[in-house]
Amino acid sequence: MTPGGSEIARERIRRLHDLAREAAGDGNDERAREYVRRARRVAERNRLGLPRRFKRFTCDACDAYLRPSVNARVRLRDGHVVVTCDCGTQARYPYE
Amino acid sequence: MMPLTPETLPRHELAGLDVEVVAAANPDAIGIAGTVVTETTKTLGVEGTDRVWHVPKDAATFRFDLPAEGDSESQSVRVRGSNLVARPARRTEATGDSKWR
């Protein structure tokens, strides 16, 4: 491993997140999915976590970049948020 | 932070950068310009005005435009495509910027 390697990986994940959001905004859902998958792969290979915002806005099952009300439903329940992807997968996140 | 610089480019994310093919084994590929949108082990997908070109990396030389960021000015970098031949997610790990040869 070259010094600074994981710093590049971190920056790369950040860029891929931005690219995925942009592609999803333009309606290029498959392209966004590709960026999400690659960001996950980069994180995995470099043993890095993913930013919280990335985790909240991507689907664990189908890797889609989630846009609330477009391809994801967001509902509040007691103590948690439920985000439902168009593929049917639900993710729950706590709130205070 | 280790931002996108000419030195780190072969190990960094190429998608989203503006690129032009400056040399290639296939004469028709020379001059293709646009934004990198996809990448496979052996090709770069360059989106031009009306289509996406899949350019073989191995047989081409690319010129990437790095956008101005913070206090650095925008600059362009020529990269031999053979330095980029690797699975997209694996380029970060080592290959591409070896100082040997």
Image (cartoon, helix red, strand yellow):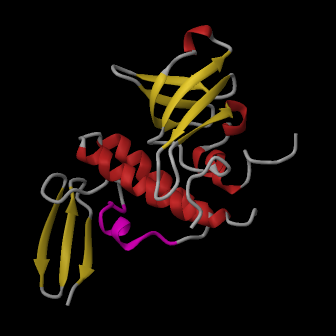
Residue at x 19% of width, y 53% of height: A71
The answer to if A17 sits in the magenta stretch is no
Residue at x 56% of width, y 53% of height: B4
Question: In the picture provided, is B26 more to the left or to the right than B97?
Answer: left
Residue at x 38% of width, y 49% of height: A19
**Residue A78 in picture, x, y percent from top left:** 12, 87
**Residue B31 in picture, x, y percent from top left:** 53, 16
Determine which quarter of the picture holds residue B55.
Answer: top right
Please determine whether, in this image, residue A69 is positioned above or below residue A32.
below
Question: In the picture provided, is A65 more to the left or to the right than A69?
Answer: right
**Residue A55 in picture, x, y percent from top left:** 36, 68
Q: Give B9 or B13, whichever is nearer the viewer.
A: B9
Please determine whether, in this image, residue B66 is positioned above or below residue A93.
above
Please determine whether, in this image, residue B39 is positioned above or below residue A71.
above
Question: In the picture provided, is A74 more to the left or to the right than B79?
Answer: left
Q: Give A49 or B18, whichever is nearer the viewer.
A: B18
Quarter of the picture containing the N terminus of chain B is bottom right
Please determine whether, in this image, residue A82 is positioned above or below residue B30.
below
Quarter of the picture containing the C terminus of chain B is top right
> Going by the picture, which residue comes out furthest to the top?
B27
For the image, the number of numbered tags is: 0
Magenta range is A49-60
Residue at x 53% of width, y 43% of height: B14
**Residue B60 in picture, x, y percent from top left:** 65, 23
The answer to if A54 sits in the magenta stretch is yes
Q: Give A35 or B66, whichever is nearer the viewer.
A: B66
> Going by the picture, which residue comes out furthest to the bottom?
A96
Question: In the picture provided, is A88 more to the left or to the right than B1?
Answer: left
